[in-house]
Image (tube, grey):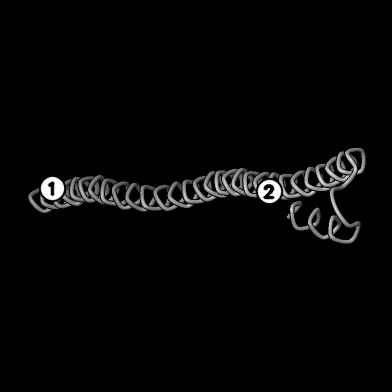
Amino acid sequence: FPLKLEGKLESKLGGKLPRKLEEKLEAKLEAKLEAKLEEKLEAKLERLLEAKLQCKLEAKLESKLEAKLEAKLEAKLENKLERHLSTKLEHKLEAKLESKLAVKLDQKLRRRIGDRLEDRLR
């Protein structure tokens, strides 16, 4: 790139470029090239940082969502288990009470029958 430009200028000026002009052109081209490279590097860094931040943010959000879902599922399962245990306990208590009542009723009936038999025998 710089050689083409130098060649064009040389042909227009009719020979070799003066040393000062050549140095000036070189410095100018170098500055332009440096600015271009700097711009490219900045854009590249910006994209890299954006990607890095996006990954970080996604990981953070994923972690938050995971924790939120975990808590939600835990609560749901806890409620389900509580209802199941509650129902199971109710049935167990009902059966126990029925059994106790049956025994009491049986004893009461036996006493009554016994009392009636005694009354009849007298």
Mark before the other along the chain sequence, 2 or 1: 2
Q: Residue at x 39, y 49 (%)?
A: 81
In this view, the residue in front, 33 or 39, is: 33
Give the quadrant of the N terminus. Answer: bottom right
For residue 45, side relative to residue 71 (left or right): right
**Which numbered marker is on residue 43?**
none
Q: Residue 120's x, y, as percent?
A: 11, 53
Q: Residue 76's x, y, as percent?
A: 48, 52
For residue 67, side relative to residue 53 (left or right): left
Provide the residue designation for mark 1: 114
In this view, the residue in front, 33 or 5, is: 5
Q: How many marks?
A: 2
Q: Residue at x 11, y 47 (%)?
A: 118
For residue 79, side relative to residue 7 (left or right): left
Provide the residue designation for mark 2: 44
Extreme-left residue of the structure: 121
| Amino acid marked by disc 2 | Lys
